[in-house]
Amino acid sequence: MVRAIRGAIQVDANEREAILAGVTELVTEVMERNRLTTEDVISVIFTATPDLTAEFPALAARKLGFHDVPLICATEIDVPGALPRVVRLMAHVEVDRPRQEIQHVYLRGAVALRVDIAQ
């Protein structure tokens, strides 16, 4: 079965290392909490708020071993008053678990984005 996993993290600053560290933390948590390997991952879409321009979030996933997984980055809609410095992801994975067992991961300040599903 194909499942989609959502996640987000608020990073400390628009700096290359802050973005890479935050995305590494987010991707690692998504993979661990859902007991996944890169073989389970079909693709990942990353978005970043318009104030994050110092690095592509997908680079962190590549450094974690996502070498043959399709990845793409995009800019999140610039909504007035939105939480700043946020990287979001939507990972499409192939697993044999029901949807209710999927763990969506919201870290740091991004927990406020989806208190209904953040774990």
Image: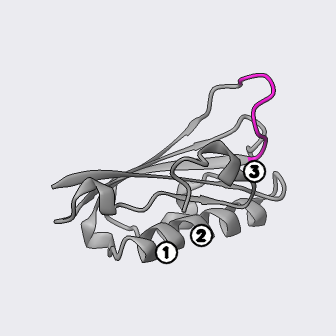
CA gap between label 3 and label 1 equals: 19 Å
Badge 1 marks a residue whose secondary structure is loop
Extent of the magenta region: 79-85
Going 81% across and 51% down the picture, which residue do you hit? 14
Q: Say the numbered circle drawn on residue 30.
A: none
Please, what is the three-letter code of the amino acid marked with disc 2?
Answer: Thr
Q: Quadrant of residue 20?
A: bottom right
Which marked residue is nearer to the observer: mark 3 or mark 2?
Answer: 2
Residue in the foreground of this view, choosing between 88 and 111 = 111
**Residue 66, percent across and down?**
40, 68
Give the x, y percent position of residue 15: 81, 57
- Lower sequence index among marks 2 and 1: 2
Q: Which mark is residue 64?
A: 1
Name the front one of labels 2 and 1. Answer: 2
| Residue 65 visible here | no
- Residue at 76% x, 46% y: name it: 85
